Amino acid sequence: MHRPPPPLPLDARGPRCKNISMPEPVVLIANGDLRLAANQMCWPAQAKAEEAVFQAIRREGCEVRRGHLYDPAKQHGFIDSQKRGMEVFREIPPEAPLLVVEAVWQYSHHVLHGLYTHRGPILTVANWSGQWPGLVGMLNLNASLTKAGVAYSTLWSGDFSDDFFLIGLRHWLTGQPVKHDTSHVHPLKDFKLPPRAEKIADVLATDLRRNKAIMGVFDEGCMGMYNAIIPDELLHPTGVFKERLSQSALFAAIERIPDETAQAVRSWLDARGMQFRTGADPETELTDSQILEQCKMYIAGMRIADDFGCDAIGIQYQQGLKDLTPASDLAEGLFNNVDRPPVRDARGRVLYENQALPHFNEVDECAGLDALVTNRIWTHLGYEPETTLHDLRYGETYANDSDEFVWVFEISGAVPPNHLAGGYAGAVSERQPPMYFRLGGGTIKGVSKPGEIVWSRIFVDNGALKADLGRAKAVDLPKEETERRWQITTPQWPIMHAVTYGVTRDQMMARHKSNHIQVAYAPDAEGANLALAAKAATFREMGMDVAICGTQNGLL
């Protein structure tokens, strides 16, 4: 049993620190998942992180208490719903310094309401670990706070004893916001872009405004990701409009697809060399029937997208469909690949023939807009247009000749096989973890091929659409190192080993306004620089405030 230190009485008052005159003690809260199994499984890691943070604060001579109790019936101490979050915030003094500690994925809307109106200083903290993961949860909460216009500070640490964390914590405990180095961020106006990039931007942005595009959204909002919803009034000036679709319609369409039609998709994948690691127990293993249901989702999603004229689609899945069907990940990755099993309509027409249908995992509309634009620019340039989002999951310095910091980019779904070393033949489908996906379903697991990439993120800040872009490379790591990184994150999911150019670990964490990062390959460094320039200029012509992050060969 892992219990946090008992909270002080809710009416406790007194100086926050022995040598600092403050009206309230520090209050610590922990936001979690909606799913009981996930909260129970992840609680020990959260309790360990909280205890380390408690000790660090107390060593500074400061008083700290937990803002809500451990629940012995649920066997965790997380805020696990918006309702529970509102109950907790009613008991927190509005002026108290508030600390949100995350060692897990969390649903930001559970606490966003209270953070909106909280008048005291706010600090978000995550453990530097890929395990559940707190880094991803904190980045989502930070991005949601940024969109909401709520001031906050943020810190991260492996064991909460390093100078980076302790100095930042001490600064916050004195009542000052924590500042980070963001010197890697450069406004686009500081660059002279190649004429070809400017011409591409003019053509594509003009086409979007004139002819417009449709982004199909299967149930808006997913797992509390407030940051992933673009308000219509910000989206429409770009020329992109939402078609709000229902997951119930998707499920109904799945139910109408014959088994033999779905089996044709499975057979196509088998013929391409994709492996499915199956078993007999649906509770813990991937089964053939789960795969067949995922193939039906792929067919149904493609047909609905065509019916509504969608240029990109996003499936919320993790709430709603999780109680009805296996995971959407297999379908999502196939959508994003140009070479994929053919889907026909009632007249026999192949849908989206020789095209990717950009899919944005977890209906992250910022990623969806990005994917749509990326697809058009890369197609215009004659590049392979496959694109996907990843979680900015974790990272470590890899001890080799260059001692580079290598990120773990990892996401449950949406990764196209073309991004993987070996393509379909390098892809393995494994059952999703039961604590997240009760009804199972297979992933598209593999290692991203080495190559030059462009990364990006669209986000909402201060009522405006903004975009950060940068350059990076996907690298090869030894098989044993890849396996080690998989085992300390989620081994069923596809992985990209990424090195960002001119952006350190802490700079990325300080600036990045999402749990997600968009990536697309280019044929070489020169081609990636051109694609980056064209994409940045297109975003600018669509009305976004654009920044280039880090250094790029030939651009900075």
Image (tube, helix red, strand yellow):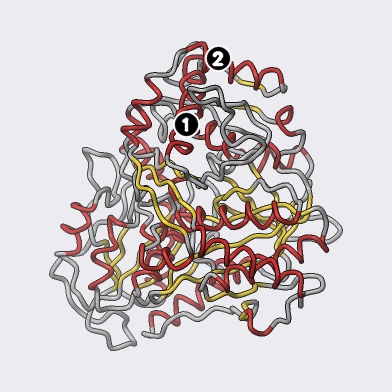
Q: Residue 183 appears at what percent x and percent y? A: 63, 81
Q: Position of residue 420 (x, y in %)?
A: 71, 39
Q: Residue at 61%, 81% (x, y): give it.
A: 187
Task: Please give left or right for residue 166 compared with residue 552 in the image.
Answer: left
Question: Which residue is found at the position 15% from the left and 65% from the top?
Answer: 91
Q: Residues within 10 Å of mark 1 (few under 14, many from 20)?
A: many
Q: Amino acid at mark 1?
A: Arg
551 on left or right of 74: right
The nearer-to-camera label among 1 and 2 is 1
Nearest to the observer: residue 484 or residue 540: 540
Q: Residues within 10 Å of mark 2 (few under 14, many from 20)?
A: some
Kindly identify the residue that appears in the image at 53 percent across and 40 percent down: 412
Residue that numbered label 1 is attached to: 303
Seen from the viewer's position, the closer of residues 454 and 253 is 253
Image label count: 2
Residue 286 higher or lower than 124, as above or below:
above
Say which quarter of the image contains residue 120: bottom left
Q: Does residue 193 appear to the left or right of 220 in the view shown? A: right
Under tag 1, what secondary structure? helix
Residue 121 position in % (x across, y down): 32, 78
Q: Earlier in the sequence, mark 1 or mark 2?
A: 2
Q: Marks 1 and 2, Cα distance to the nearest angstrom? A: 17 Å
Q: Can residue 118 be seen in the rendering of this structure?
A: yes
**Residue depicted at x 18% and y 73%:** 93
- The numbered dot on residue 263 is 2
Instruction: Using the image, determine if residue 549 lies above or below residue 388.
Output: below
Q: Secondary structure at mark 2?
A: helix
Disc 2 residue type (three-letter): Gln
Instruction: Work out which quarter of the rendered image holds the C terminus and state it.
Output: bottom right
Which of the 4 quarters of the picture holds residue 128? Answer: bottom right
Mark 1 touches mark 2? (CB < 8 Å): no
